Amino acid sequence: MAYPARGFSFGLIKADDKNNSEASLKARNLSFRSPIWEGHVGAELNILDIDDKGFTPYIFGGVALFSFYPSAKDSSGARVPLRRLSTEGRGSRSIPNAADSMPCTRSPSLSA
C-alpha cells in the first residue's frame, strides 16, 4: 500500500548581540534575522501488508525545497539583504554552496 507524504514548515530565526551578556559580543553589535521555509512531497510504499505480517520492508522517495534569506538593519534602520555579502560562508572552501550539495541517505528499514 502506498502512503503520500507532504508538508510545509515556516519559521523565523534571529539573533542580536545587544542581548548577549558578554561585553565583547555586545561591542561587536551584530544582528540578523532570516525567514526559513521548507516544503516536501513524497510517498512510502509498503512491500507487504503490515496488518497481515506485522512488519514490512518499505520504499520511500520524495523531494524537498528549502530557503532562508538572512538580513540585517544598517545604521539608518534600513533592512540589508546579507546573502549577496556571503556572510553565511557561501563561496568558502569549507562550506559548499547549496547548489553543490545534495543530501542523500539510504538504509534498510522495517516498519513495525
Image (tube, helix red, strand yellow):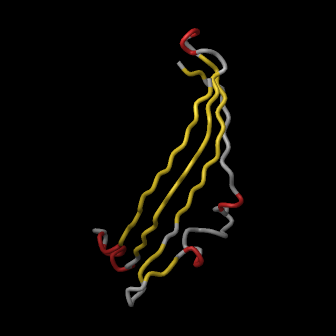
Q: Is residue 3 placed above or below 92 in the rendered structure?
A: above
Residue occupying the point 36% across, 71% down: 16
* Left-right relation of 67 to 31: right
**Quarter of the image where the N terminus is located:** top right
The x, y position of residue 51, in whole percent, is 54, 12
Query: Foreground: 30 or 66?
Result: 66
Seen as rendered, the residue at the extreme right is 100
Residue occupying the point 41% across, 62% down: 12
* Left-right relation of 94 to 70: right
Residue occupying the point 41% across, 81% down: 73
Query: Foreground: 47 or 33?
Result: 47
The x, y position of residue 41, in whole percent, is 59, 44
Seen as rendered, the residue at the extreme top is 52
The x, y position of residue 102, in whole percent, is 68, 51
The x, y position of residue 54, in whole percent, is 54, 11
Count how many numbered circles sit on residues in the image: 0
Q: Is residue 45 placed above or below 92 in the rendered structure?
A: above
Residue occupying the point 58% across, 78% down: 85
* Left-right relation of 44 to 24: right
Seen as rendered, the residue at the extreme bottom is 76
